[in-house]
Every structure is written in structure tokens, then in C-alpha cells.
Amino acid sequence: MSTPSAPSATATASTAPSPPARLGTTLLVIVTAYLMVGVDSTVVNVALPDIQRGLHFSRTGLSWVLNAYTLAFGGLLLLGGRVGDVLGRRRTLTTGVLLFAVSSLLGGLAVDGGWLLAARALQGLGAALIAPSTLALITTNFPDGPRRHHALSVYSAMAGIGGSAGLVLGGMLTSWASWRWALLINVPIGAALALALPRFVTETPRHAGRFDLAGALTGTAGTTSLVYAFIRVSEAGWSDTRALLGFSAAAALLAGFVLVESRADQPVMPLRLLGDRNRAGAYASILLLPAGMFGAFYFLSLVCQQALRYSPLRAGFAFLPMTLVMFTAVRLVPRLLARFGVKPVLLTGMTLVTVACGWLWRLGPGDGYATGLLGPLMLLGLGTGLSFMPLNATILSAVEPREAGAASGLLQTLQWLGGTVGLSVLVTVYGTATRHTTGAPGAVLVHGSARAFGVGALLTVAALAVAATVLTGRRSD
């Protein structure tokens, strides 16, 4: 299906320099849209015990409340980026915001587990339209160099703060109202954004092209099969027939995805984006790093409430030190990049994340918040703040405007796919470690979580090794 290019007047308007005040307002609207997605990625974490009791999920099945969202999000991000390139990124962003708000309303009204999972998957579709459009709009509105680094630092701050602030907000809403408000809060925010976007954000030129539906479908089906197989292993063991079939289907589908993309005239994932060594290394790192650390939020939320007996509100505020440290670090990153370059800043951040995951590996039933959690949480905040903005800048450097959507879509696809598959792997580790463990429920939870943190540390070590050996260390412009 082809779509004609927009009139030349649109292109002229979108490429004309905007005054700083207008750019500031534009950036505010864009990052608020992405903040909504970032908050939603974790806002339900603290509410998980209440959701489990209210809708009768099993412990391992509960992870699908997260996976239903992140699978649809990560699996459709490439297509979402391509939709923005063809139809216009502001239009795509507005559509995504409205879909996200409607699906949040449906999730907040869910009466059973299937209804909630369906709404979460629909949220993921909305997020897949939002995320690449926000990052691509920053790329096309801000020239490469200090202005773009500043915009990316604000964007990275919102992405990181959104995830950790979601934990605090989720605790507040769950304690003061209901877990349902962790979803319903998106409705008024989405409505306000849908009204603001046409007023403050200029539409980008459209590019004639086709939608690579075959690539999007094979990629999404392949990742879904992979995560399902890991969840089955966590519930039934490695000899489970459904798990083995899931792994086989994932291998076939993902191989088919690569074949489709190599032959497509306009692929949803242009393989030429991987031709640059630094960009390819950054893509690999942004896949592996969330795979190791994303599960930390999931398991730490459960440990705080079910082992330390925190209320949802107190559990949310337990993550506040991480949020504050992350915000401080992200604000310093542009200056650190200008002085030291990308590679030293990135390796420092990834090392801190690895140390934090390794520290959590030593978590024991007798550890309290101050002795077992506070230190790792602060290291996670500092390491995350130093890691993601340099990776974003490396990937988006020298990308042609017509491929900005595809490049940002692939970036976020790998980031969320890494988090989703990583969480599935860690849930599998948890299920294997606790299947035959006896004792108090809180002690069993801590034991299994610690084993999951250990595997998470190995994944972050792999990310660190890729960044250290593949990235060339060129200074950031």
C-alpha cells in the first residue's frame, strides 16, 4: 500500500528553523507523550500483588501483565516507526496517544485476567505508535550537535524518570484508591496531549512507501513465541512439550523475519542501519542492558511488599532514591560527553549497573531495605542515567531524516524486546530456583529473586563486553 508524499509546503514548514521558545514547547509536548509510556511501563509493578489477588493470577502468570504490554510494544515498534515515516509522525503520535488512552480506560475497567491482558496488549500497540514518533520528531527538529544532545538528555531523563516515577505513582494510586487507577490515570493525560499536539508540534514530511507487514508479523510472532516458551519453562520445566514447540516456532519465525527483511524493497528494519560499527554495537548493547536490569523492578517490587511487608505506597517510595540519582546523572551527561566522549561515560554507567545487579545477587532473607536494597537502587539509578543517553546519541548520529523513524523504532524495539525476553528469562530462573524450595514464603521469594538477579548481572556483563570491544570510542560531536 503506497501513500503519496505530502505537499512541499509541509516539508518546508517542518524543515524551517524554529525559535528556541517554540522548540522548548515542542520538546515539552513530545517528552510528555513519551513520559506517559515510560510511566506505564512500571506503574503497574507496585500494583501487581493487588492485581494478582483481584484477578486470580498465578505468580509466574502474573508476569504476563507486563509481558502482554511489552510484547505488543516491542514487537510492533518497527512497524510504528515506518507508519510515522509514511503517514506523518505527528499524526501517528496523536493516533497512538488516543489509542493508549482508550486502552487504558478498558484496562482500568477489567473484570477478569483475559480482559486485562487484552487491554494491556492494546496499550502496547498505542505505545508502539508513540515511542518512535517522539524520538524521530526530536531527531528531525534538532540539528546534530549540542542542541540535539540537550534534547536527547531531556528525553532520556523522561524515559528513565518515567520508569522509576511510575513505581512511586503506582504505589500512591494503589494505596489511596485502587490498582485500577494505575491505568485510568492515562485517560486525562492522553486527552490533553491529543489536544496539544496539533497546536504545538509541526507535522513532518511524509515519504512515499509501503508497510512491511510480513516483517512486522513474523518479528512479533517470533518474539511472542520466545517469551511464551520461557514462561512455560518457568511453570512446567524444560521438558514441557509446549515450551519446546514455542522455542522451535520462535527460531523459525525469527529466521523468517531476517529473510523477509533482507529481500524487502522497503523493510520495516533496514539492515543497512547495522552497517556502521558504532551503531551496530550500540544496538546490541541496548538489547542486552535492559535484559539484565528490567527484571530488577519486577522482583524488587515483590520483595518490598511480600518479603519486607511494605504497603504499595511505601514500596513505591522505596524507589525514590534511584529516581533522584538518575535525574541528577542524566542532567550531567551532555557535559560529560563533551568532555570525555561517549565510550568512557557509557562504560562507567554500564559497570555501575553490573555492580548493582551483582550486589542484588547477594540478597538474603535477613537483609532489610538499608542493608540490601538502598545501595543497589542508587547504583542502578546512576548507571542507567549514564548509559542510555550515550547509546541513543550513538544510534541516531548521522541518520538521514527519511530513516529517522526506522532507526528510532529499531532502537526502542531492541530496548523493549531485551527487557521483555530478559524478564521472561529471569522469571524462568526464579521458577526453577523455587520449584522445590521450602520455607517461609518471603524467604523463598528472596531466594528465587537473588538467583534471578545473578543471571541479570551476567546479561549486563555481556552488554558491557560488547560496548567495550565494538564501540570505537570516537568523541561525541
Image (cartoon, rainbow, N blue to C red):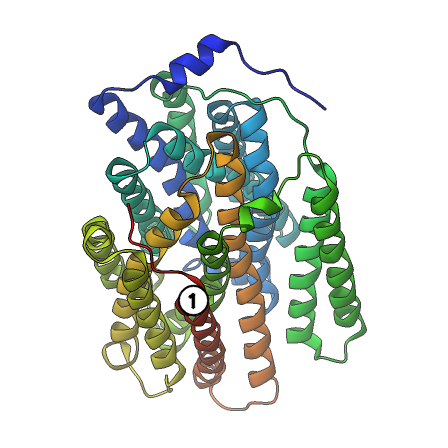
252 on left or right of 19? right
Residue 412 position within the rendered picture, expressed as x and y whole percent measured from the top left:
49, 48
Q: Residues within 10 Å of mark 1 (few under 14, many from 20)?
A: many
In which quarter of the view is residue 204 placed?
top left
> Could you say which is closer to the camera, residue 235 or residue 322?
322
> Could you say which is closer to the camera, residue 53 or residue 198?
198
In which quarter of the view is residue 122 placed?
top right
Q: Quadrant of the C terminus?
A: top left
Q: Residue at x 31, y 51 (%)?
A: 161
Residue indicated by mark 1: 293
82 on left or right of 168? right
Q: Residue at x 44, y 55 (%)?
A: 278
Q: Quadrant of the N terminus?
A: top right
Give the mark count.
Answer: 1
In which quarter of the view is residue 420 placed?
bottom right
Residue 435 position within the rendered picture, expressed as x and y whole percent measured from the top left:
61, 84
